[in-house]
Every structure is written in C-alpha cells, then in structure tokens.
Image (tube, helix red, strand yellow):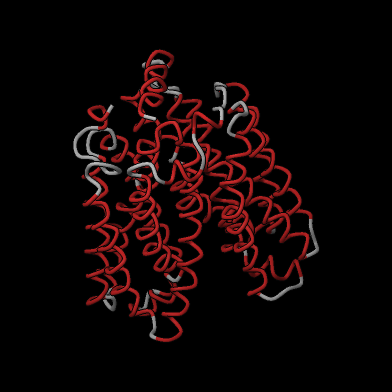
C-alpha cells in the first residue's frame, strides 16, 4: 500500500505545475458555493416556500432534511461507482444534477415532487463533496496542496456569510422561485467555467484505491473522522439553534446580524488557514478546537451578556472557517490513494453530524433549554481534542506536511 502511495505521489510531483491554477480552483469553490446555498436556502425562504407549496412550516423544513439525506445516502456508493471515471466527467455530472433539480424545485408546485428534487440535489452534493478536495489536490504540487484546498473550500463561508442573506433578501423581493432559477443560471455559467479552465484527470482503478474497509482501516483515517463527528456535532447544535440560544442575551431579533458576523469571521479564517495548513495543520486543528471550547466556556457563564456573545461568535467563526480545509487535508493525507473514498466518508460523517446536531439540540432545547448547549459542546470538543492530540503519528501528524512525504 505504501509503495502504491509513493508511486502516486511521485507521479503527482512530475505532472503538477508550480503556479496555482486559480481559475480552476475557483471553479471548484463555485461548486462548493452552489452545494451550500442549495442546501441552506430553504432555511431563509421557509415561510414563502411553505405558502407556495401549500404546506406547514415544519413540512417545508423537511426540504432541508431531504437534501441532507440525499448526501448522506449517496456519497459513498456514488463515489465507488464513479471512481474509475474521468474526473471532469464526474464533476460535470454532479453540476448538471444541480441544474436539473434546482430547476425542478423552482417550477414545482407539488410538495412530493419538491422533496424528490431536493433529495436528488443532495445526491449531487454528496458526489460533489467527495470529489472536490481530491480534485484540488491533484491540480498542484504537494507543497501547494494546502493553499489549493483553501481556495477550493472558500465557497462555503461565502455562501454562509453572503449567499444566504442575499438569497433570502432576493426571495423576499422577487419570490423564492426566482432564487432557485438564479442558482440554476449560475450553474450554467459554472458548466462553461469547468469546461474552459478545469483540467481533466483519469479515475483510479478499484484495486489501486482500495475498498471501503481497506480505506477505513488505513491508519489515521478513523481519528480524523472521529474529530469531524465531534467537532461538527458541537458546531451544528449551536448553529442550528442559534436563534433560541440568542434569546438568553436578548439578541433573538438580531439573529441575521449574528449569523453575518459569524460568516464574515469564517471567511477571514480561510485566508489564515491557507497560510498555515501546509506548515502547521496539527497545531491549527488543536488551536481551533481549544478556541471553540473557550467560547463554549464563556457562553456557559456569560450567555446573557450581548458583548460576550458577539465576541464569542467572532472567535467561533474564526475557528470554524478553516475546518473543512484542515480536516479534509488531514483525511486525504492519511488515506493516500484512497482519498476519494475517504472523502466520501467525510461527507457521510459531516452530514451525519448535521442531522445529529438537529436532533440533539432539539432534545436539549425541549427538556433543558438553550442554556444546556455550552456544557454539551465542551464535552464534545474535549473528546475531539483528545482524539486529535493522540493522532500525532497518523491523522494529525506533527510538523510540516512536506516532511510526511
């Protein structure tokens, strides 16, 4: 296995240029943007969507659940089914999926059809997320993979900080269907962008990348996935129920402002992560986890103080912004030739944490109130920190990434 990885890495060094292919990486970032904005738009457009589909708010909210389920169910099997296909073909297949199913969502007046379209859009997202990180890494030399990943992942914080508020505003002005049509129009532009700037690569034979069990048992893969689950579960408990949490400080009427502050901080973190990921990946992960733990500790005692909440949200955003880059880089490094399969596992873990965060946070909110969030977050983050700390030989290695090759 190690010999195969060595050959693969050697080939990558010969083939890849020293200059970052920014246009191609930004096309991947736009793909991630469309994944996130497609997922989160119903949250901002829930009342008009419910009215347009003739259903209750709770039923309209299931359009988000359907999307997450599509990603959760399809990521691994679709990655395995397409692993030998040309990479750009797979990328375009996923993007065309967004075009088709966002268009169906825009024009559908039938709730059942809308749920099916949302589920299928989630399937396209699951395939996209399992592909993007590995694709970005193949475009560049090993020494630039961290920077490439940071650029390719920038679509997520942009979607959260700017895309969702803009989409919500546009939906209130022109109607929610227009927003989904606009996303489809962006997708058409993205298809041309990919064809013009994104290089193509061959897929990997099944025997080269290994099966699910082989990749899952590769040293370092399970610790990284464990950190993903702990960290993202803690994040999603707070993020999903940020509005009721803000009632403790009287900021419930400023939820949009608080989320904007969070998104802008997360966006700023991407630039910092791009500079640190190749030289201090392990340290960056540990500091991010400690930072979020300190925020949770502050919220435990001062959740009623608006200034503390705003400061905590800024730090929380800074610790979260680089998470996707750091965790996917660590996972792909650990998996080697099985990176695409490992990254599909990451999609499952990430979406599983989103779903679990909604359920766990809902139970806590109903039975103990929003004040119960911080101690649970602290426990989850302590577990994630312990796993990352212990994984210094495999998963979150000490020193610069170049020294691990």
- Name which residue lies at 51% across and 40% down: 211
Is 393 placed left or right of 43 in the picture? left
Is 60 placed left or right of 333 in the picture? right
Question: Quarter holding the N terminus?
Answer: top left
Q: Nearer the viewer, residue 272 or 400?
A: 400
Residue reaching furthest to the bottom: 367
Residue reaching furthest to the top: 14
Q: Percent position (x, y) of residue 403? A: 22, 28
Q: Percent position (x, y) of residue 372? A: 34, 79
Q: Nearer the viewer, residue 375 or 55?
A: 375
- Name which residue lies at 22% across and 70% down: 298
Q: Quadrant of residue 192?
A: top right
Answer above or below: position of 384 versus 101.
Answer: below
Answer above or below: position of 171 versus 300.
Answer: above
- Name which residue lies at 23% across and 58% down: 386
Is 224 placed left or right of 353 in the picture? left
Answer above or below: position of 168 versus 401.
Answer: below
Q: Percent position (x, y) of residue 120? A: 69, 51
Q: Quadrant of residue 49?
A: bottom right
Q: Percent position (x, y) of residue 85? A: 62, 29
Residue 193 visible in this rendered orientation of the protein: no
- Name which residue lies at 25% across and 37% down: 276
Question: Quarter holding the C terminus?
Answer: top left
């Amino acid at each position: 296995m190690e010999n195969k990885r060595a050959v693969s890495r050697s080939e990558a060094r010969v083939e890849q240029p020293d200059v970052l292919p920014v246009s191609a990486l930004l096309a991947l970032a736009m793909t991630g943007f469309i994944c996130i904005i497609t997922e989160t738009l119903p949250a901002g457009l829930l009342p008009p969507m419910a009215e347009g589909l003739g259903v209750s708010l709770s039923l309209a909210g299931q359009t988000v659940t359907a999307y997450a389920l599509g990603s959760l169910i399809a990521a691994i099997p679709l990655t395995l089914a397409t692993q030998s296909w040309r990479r750009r073909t797979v990328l375009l297949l996923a993007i065309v999926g967004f075009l088709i199913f966002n268009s169906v969502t825009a024009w559908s007046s039938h709730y059942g059809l809308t749920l099916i379209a949302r589920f299928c859009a989630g399937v396209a997202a699951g395939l996209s997320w399992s592909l993007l990180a590995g694709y970005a890494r193949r475009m560049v030399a090993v020494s630039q993979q961290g920077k490439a990943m940071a650029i390719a992942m920038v679509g997520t914080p942009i979607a959260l900080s700017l895309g969702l508020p803009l989409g919500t505003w546009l939906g209130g002005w022109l109607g929610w269907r227009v927003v989904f049509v606009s996303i489809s129009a962006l997708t058409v532009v993205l298809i041309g962008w990919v064809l013009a700037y994104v290089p193509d690569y061959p897929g990997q034979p099944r025997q080269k990348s290994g099966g699910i069990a082989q990749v899952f048992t590769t040293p370092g893969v399970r610790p990284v996935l464990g950190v993903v689950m702990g960290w993202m579960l803690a994040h999603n408990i707070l993020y999903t129920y940020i509005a009721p949490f803000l009632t403790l400080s009287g900021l419930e009427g400023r939820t949009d402002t608080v989320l904007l502050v969070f998104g802008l901080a997360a966006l700023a973190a991407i630039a910092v992560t791009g500079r640190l990921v190749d030289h201090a990946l392990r340290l960056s992960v540990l500091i991010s986890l400690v930072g979020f733990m300190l925020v949770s500790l502050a919220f435990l005692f001062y959740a009623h103080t608006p200034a503390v909440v705003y400061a905590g949200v800024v730090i929380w955003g800074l610790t979260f912004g680089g998470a996707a880059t750091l965790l996917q880089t660590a996972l792909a490094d650990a998996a080697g030739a099985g990176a695409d399969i490992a990254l599909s596992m990451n999609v499952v873990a990430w979406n599983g944490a989103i779903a679990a965060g909604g359920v766990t946070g809902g139970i806590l909110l109903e039975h103990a109130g929003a004040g119960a969030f911080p101690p649970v977050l602290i426990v989850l983050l302590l577990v994630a920190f312990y796993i990352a700390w212990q994984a210094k030989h495999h998963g979150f290695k000490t020193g610069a990434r170049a020294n691990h090759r």
